[in-house]
Image (spheres, grey):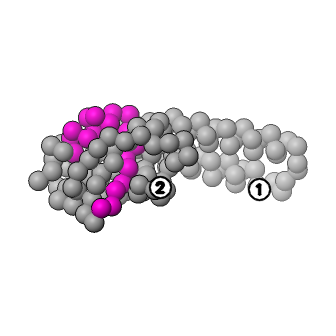
């Protein structure tokens, strides 16, 4: 049973990849490259755009789960391992995607709003979302 589910579109990630394609196109016209390089680079951009086009967060009866795009990169934690959740703001220097920050692992595709989920042993994860109040409330309601 899904208690909460929301998908945020990755507008920042898609815009960054589009800028990357434009830069690569400009560079390809300025400097000749072997014929396989340009299609290979564009292919990488297309795969990245598909894989990171969105971030979906779900809360089920026992778990908090999140995944990018079609769900190849999927993480989940037991609700019983969560100690709390609070609304947080990420900084421009934190960027977007999947990476470690000073607060813990960040999973984000767009914007600066997030929910910091406190786990056992003081660890935190930050889940980017465009509806932080709803996500925080759903997490707190679902805790055992």
In the visual, does 17 lie left or right of 94? right
Tell me where residue 40 sits by quadrant.
Answer: bottom right
Give x and y (percent) for residue 12: 54, 37
* Circle number at residue 101: 2
Give x and y (percent) for residue 126: 38, 50
Q: Is residue 4 visible?
A: no
Give x and y (percent) for residue 68: 42, 49
For residue 63: magenta? no
Q: Secondary structure at mark 1?
A: loop
The range drawn in magenta is: 122-139
Q: Tell me which numbered mark, 1 or 2, is placed earlier along the sequence.
A: 1
* Circle number at residue 36: 1
Contact between marks 1 and 2 (CB within 8 A): the answer is: no
In the visual, does 73 lie left or right of 16? left
Residue that appears at 52% across and 48% down: 94
Tell me where residue 6 sits by quadrant.
Answer: top left
Q: Residue furthest bottom?
A: 121
In the visual, does 141 lie left or right of 113? left
Alpha-carbon span between mark 1 and mark 2: 36 Å
Residue that appears at 30% across and 58% down: 76
* Circle number at residue 2: none
Q: Is residue 94 visible?
A: yes
Q: Mark 1 or mark 2: which is in front?
A: 2
């Amino acid at each position: 049973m899904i208690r909460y589910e929301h998908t945020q579109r990755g507008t920042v990630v898609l815009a960054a990849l589009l800028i990357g394609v434009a830069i690569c196109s400009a560079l390809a016209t300025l400097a000749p490259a072997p014929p396989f390089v340009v299609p290979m680079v564009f292919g990488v951009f297309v795969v990245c755009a598909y894989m990171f086009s969105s971030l979906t967060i779900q809360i089920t009866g026992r778990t908090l789960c999140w995944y990018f795009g079609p769900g190849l990169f999927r993480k989940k934690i037991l609700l019983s391992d969560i100690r709390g959740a609070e609304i947080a703001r990420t900084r421009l220097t934190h960027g977007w995607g999947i990476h470690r920050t000073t607060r813990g692992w960040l999973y984000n595709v767009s914007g600066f709003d997030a929910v910091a989920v406190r786990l056992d042993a003081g660890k935190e994860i930050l889940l980017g979302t465009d509806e932080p109040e709803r996500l925080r409330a759903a997490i707190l309601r679902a805790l055992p």
